[in-house]
Amino acid sequence: MNALERLQGKIEELKNSYEGIKQESRDLKGQLEEKENAYAEQQSTIDLLRYELEEKDHEIEEIITKVEALLA
């Protein structure tokens, strides 16, 4: 094997490595997008639950005020 053939072999190895890295990068980006979407969904659920909790707290305060008024 002469120097040119060895160089061509190395170039081919580098091309294959590069393609592998590109594919891995695409896979990782896809996984990241999935995680970001899942996070956004969970954050929306958390925000909704916080809002509902605030509403329930407000309703409880109104009930307590009415009960106190009845007992007074």
Image: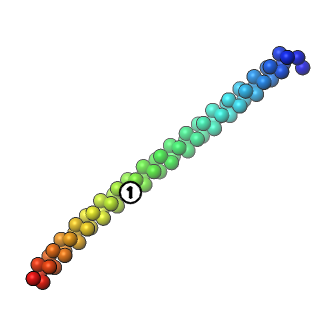
Q: Is residue 57 above or below residue 19?
A: below
Q: Residues within 10 Å of mark 1 (few under 14, many from 20)?
A: few
Q: Amino acid at mark 1?
A: Thr
Q: Position of residue 68 (x, y in %)?
A: 14, 79
Quadrant housing residue 28: top right
Q: How many marks?
A: 1
Residue in the image at 9% along x and 82% along y: 72
Coloring basis for residues: rainbow
Q: Quadrant of residue 54?
A: bottom left
Horizontally, residue 41 falls left or right of residue 70, namely right
Q: Give coordinates of residue 52: x percent, y percent.
A: 30, 62
* Disc 1: which residue: 45
At 22% from the left and 66% from the top, the residue drawn is: 58
Q: Picture coordinates of residue 60 (x, y %)? A: 23, 72
Q: Which residue appears at 22% of the width and 69% of the height?
A: 59
Q: Secondary structure at mark 1?
A: helix
Task: Say above or below: 62 vs 17.
Answer: below
Horizontally, residue 14 falls left or right of residue 34, namely right
Residue at the extreme bottom of the image, as rendered: 71
- Among all residues in the image, which is located at the extreme right? 1
Query: Does residue 24 lie above or below 51 as drawn?
Result: above
Quadrant in which the N terminus appears: top right
Residue 64 at x, y = what percent?
19, 76
Residue found at x 75% / y 22%: 11
Q: Is residue 1 above or below residue 43?
A: above
Residue 30 figure quarter: top right
